[in-house]
Amino acid sequence: MSDSIYKNAKDAFIDKVEPERFVRLDSNVVKLEKLHSIIDTPFKIVLISGEPGIGKTMLLHRFLYELSDTNSVVALFQPAFSLEEFKKKISTKIFGHHVDPMEAMNRIDGTKTIIVDEAQLYSIEILEYIRILADTQKYKFILSLHQNTNEEIMAKKHFQTRIAHTIELKPPNQKEFHIYVQKKLFSYNAIEIAQAFTPKMSNKIYNFTHGNLRNSNKFLYTLFDILHYFEEKSPTLLKNKIVDEKFIEMSAIHLGYINA
Amino acid sequence: MKKFILFLVPIVLLHANPIKKLIQDYKEKNYYDVCMNGIRYFKILQRDENLLSMYAFSCLYIDKIDRLYLPTMMLGKTKTSRHNRSYFSLIIAQKNILVSALIDHEQYEGLNVPNTDYVLSRVFNLYFQKKYKKIDNVYIMQDSIAKYRVYVKEENKKKWLFIEEERDGKKFLHKYR
Amino acid sequence: MHEYDRLYQRWKRYRFKKILKTILFLLILCLVVVGLLFAYRFKTHENITTKKLPKTNNIILPQKEFEKHLKAPSYKYRSKRKKSIKKKPIRTHRAIQQPVPKTIIQKPLIIKNDQVDINELKRLFFKAPTPSKALIIARRYYQQKRYKESALWALKANELDKSNKESWLLFAKSLAKQGKKREAINVLRIYYKKSGSKDARILIQDIINGVFR
């Protein structure tokens, strides 16, 4: 199996956290800047909301990556399922060992910011505890959760006036999406493919995934996987094109976007 | 004195209602007087379709077909006047076509028009059905109503269409142009 | 990967169905368009059946019902002639301020367009009065339905030339138009007496029997 041009392309779209290869788009750059601007200001709660797969987690990873001072910010990307677990996780990250965050509060110089991803998974109990911690003004929280869920409503209810900012993430438009695909391909050295990938193709995929990045990644991965397979098996199918339209359709069928 | 009498005459005449006189003439079949005098009172006649019809028929009976144009245009308020309008229109058309055919030797075909009781219509139909005998440029025709001699003759440097009609032992001469 | 081979088959089926659908759609579209065209043509196309013209044996006869309804319209006419013709004094007009020169060089007044100002005409008249100039002014006023003024100017023309027929007639017409029919007729009678003019006679009759209104 010779080195296929499609291999790199496939890699580009594997769902993994690589903040250094974060694709900057106009829309997400703005959000990042916002985060940077508020991180040092006093606040209790900041909400980051957006539909699942929009890139909240990736954004937060990138944010952390960009932070110069990593001491005062910790992040919980794996959810905790009980209050005890939660306390354990954050105290370990902040203090290095398991303590009661309320008791250890005074040990903190200044404030500590805790980023909590998938906050919609947290129970009311934990949310209330977060509120209590936030009220001490020693702990600041950035909560990332899925938009338009009961959990979001509940979270908002619980925190009410304590929410200083809400950062909403929206899917990219068609133009941005195309840039995303190309940048991704470029950053993974799939240059031929990046050059051969036309806006028309991006639009076709956009029509299926509506710009949802997780779904789009999956789609593109599938696409290059199929291309890779047929490149070896029956190259004539490729019709001398790097990406023939039919493979996009095939991906769509495979993933269930087209009923066939 | 002469001038005074002359002056009186028009005054005397002024006492009579001219329209009444026309009606009187029409009833007495003085069609010539009705048609010739009627033109002067046309403005009054045109206001009444009955009077207008009277004038038109009078002119028809003295073969003054050209005088039928105006009344034909103006009639049309009632069913009867419209009928007479068609009647006059037909005669006007037949006169013009027949004159053109006989004086200028124009060819007309496909003429299939209704007939009227007027002499010209009868001659028209006989001519276009080719029911005639031509002897020395005179067309001799006959039907159940009369015998006809039709020819073209020049009078005062103008060509006229003459129709001699012999009907019920009487002879009538009609002249058209 | 087996599944991708199967996927390819699926895709082929999908493609085939899609093409079929497109063809079908186009076909239906064509049929619809053609159908519409035909329908439109049939609508506008009138069914002209060659009708045979029937042989006309029927004669159109005139309808003489009008003869029963012949009625002369009523109109005013003079019942009695006055025994003596009163000579009505001709109205005097305001004296001309400027003296009339003895030798008048008649400059022909050529009016090139109708829009020559009436005041200009008057100015020219007063500069060198002639019956024709006065009549032009009188006619203009008559056209403008200013019968008082047209009478005045007709009179002026008449004073300059008593034999001028038009000045008589125009004066009488102006009077008649003002409703002064009697005066008008009188004037015409006087003139007719003088000249025996046929036009005067006709105008008298016309005024009497209402033809001239």
Image (spheres, coloured by chain):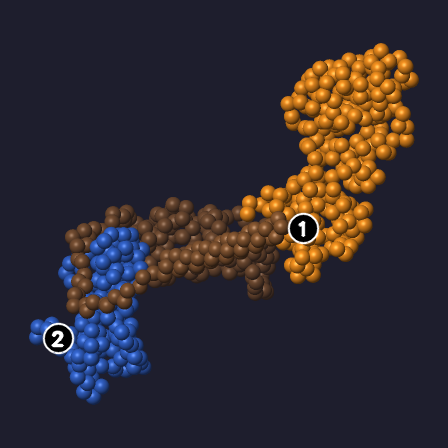
Chain colours: A orange, B blue, C brown
Tally of numbered discs: 2
Quadrant, the N terminus of chain B: bottom left
Query: What is the x, y in percent for residue A244?
Result: 67, 55
Q: Is residue B55 visible?
A: no
- What chain letter is assigned to the residue under label 2? B
Side of A244 where C156 appears, left or right? left
Residue visible at 20% across and 88% down?
B136
Distance between the alpha carbons at the discs numbered 1 and 2: 105 Å
Residue visible at 74% across and 52% down?
A6
The amino acid at mark 1 is Ile
Disc number lying in front (1 or 2)? 1
Helix or strand or loop: what does disc 2 sit on?
A: loop
Query: What is the x, y in percent for residue A83?
Result: 74, 16
The quadrant where residue A166 appears: top right
Q: Is residue A67 visible?
A: yes
Between residue A63 and residue C108, name the one nearer to us: A63
Residue A226's disc is 1
Residue visible at 23% across and 68% down?
C52
Residue C162 position (above or below residue A90): below
Mark 2 crowdedness (10 Å alpha carbons): few <14, some 14-19, many ≥20:
few
- What chain letter is assigned to the residue under label 1? A
Residue under pointer 2: B143
Query: What is the x, y in percent for residue B61?
Result: 20, 66
Mark 1 crowdedness (10 Å alpha carbons): few <14, some 14-19, many ≥20:
many
Quadrant, the C terminus of chain B: bottom left
| Residue at the extreme left | B169
The amino acid at mark 2 is Asp
